[in-house]
Image (cartoon, rainbow, N blue to C red):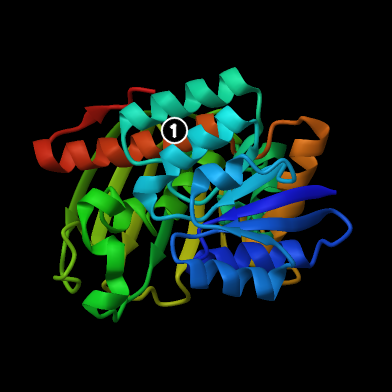
Amino acid sequence: MLRVGIVGCGGIAAAHMQGYSQLQDKAKITAVCDVDAAKAASAAERFGPARTYTDVQDLMADSEVDAVSICLPHHLHAPAILAAATAGKHVLCEKPLCTTREEAIAVREAVRASGITLMCAHNQLFEPAIDHAREVISSGALGDIYMASTADCFTVHNSAEQWGWRRNLATAGGGELLDTGYHPTYTLLYLMSLAGLAPIEVAAMQGRYRQMMLEGEDTAHVLVRFNGGAIGQILTSWSFELPEGTHSFHVIGEKGQLYGRRNVSTFQPNGGESQTVTREPVVSYHRQLPHFIDAVEARRRPIQNEDDGVAVLEVILSAYDSDAQKRIVPFAV
């Protein structure tokens, strides 16, 4: 039975708490923490019984907490991870892992030194379409990969109050690309890694079209060159809709193409009939939790750990550098 502390009781925390509450034979929420005492008390009442804290350090000192879900604003992720590593608590961290290269170095060193398991909450990798993509790419059915694209786009209609900490670069760490754009970035890197491909260069352009209250961008278009010459493309926005749903992937290889979203994916071999696979829909925020628990208990590397989180962050920070400098930048990790 993994005893879990929830750090931050805002919107995304509800998905974690609901998921853990469905795993009563594997996990139990024993503590929650939020600077808003009333919010922490409400969460504890709904998903507890659980002890409540308003200070992260106090929760980390709780001997009846084995692991934490970090569901805080972006700029607070690194301090919470460092506190967890010091206290020997395993970590499931919401995106992004952190917001700066300096934080990334500190986080990776702390996790390695402590021996804890850290898993990045890259929930879209737990969607059935990605399961099928993993099978197809790992089998070699696509042959050499030429190109891949991932997207996550939708229109946001927020007031200034609703944007909250995401309005400001000091707390958000970036704009849309570091927030929603984190999903298609980790999806692209993950899919390409299945074929043994790693990023070597990044180029990007970004803009702000509708979300004028933000200090950061609301739209980004990123190109990533991988070793061997394959090209990746990331399209992400809070200013327009995609024709068929919010997020998707498309991989093109020498032997065919693979594309999909959520629970439906299609493999189109060159010269052959397309093969569409439709699987039972899942709540990916919930499906990631048993994987995290199993990784902790078996002391096994989770699907995405701190190294993966650092790589995703580096692509995004390199994209910001590219847009600012108007040039292609090398991938440094």
- In the image, taking residue 270 as reference, residue 188 lies left or right, namely left
Is 43 in front, or is 117? 43
User: Measured along the vertical axis of the image, is residue 124 above or below residue 298?
Assistant: below
- Give the camera-side residue of 93 and 233: 93
Residue type beneath disc 1: Val
**Mark 1: few/some/many CA within 10 Å (<14, 14-19, 20+):** many
Q: Residue 97: horizontal and vertical position, in percent?
A: 45, 42
**Side (left or right) of 233 relative to 207:** right
Is 26 positioned to the left or the right of 105 in the image? right
Res 254 visible:
no
Q: Identify whether 114 is placed above or below 237.
A: above
- Residue 299 appears at what percent x and percent y? 77, 30
Whether 192 is drawn above or below 227: the answer is below
Q: Position of residue 282 (x, y in %)?
A: 70, 68
Secondary structure state at the residue bearing disc 1: helix
Query: In the rendered view of the protein, which quadrant contains the C terminus?
Result: top left
Q: Which residue is pictured at 60% across the width and 52% down the height?
A: 125
- Residue drawn where x is 44% and y is 44% of the image: 77
User: Residue furthest toward the left?
Assistant: 325
Q: Quadrant of residue 53?
A: bottom right
Tell me which residue sits at (80%, 42%) in the image: 294
Residue 19 drawn at (x, y percent):
71, 65
Which residue lies under the disc numbered 1? 310
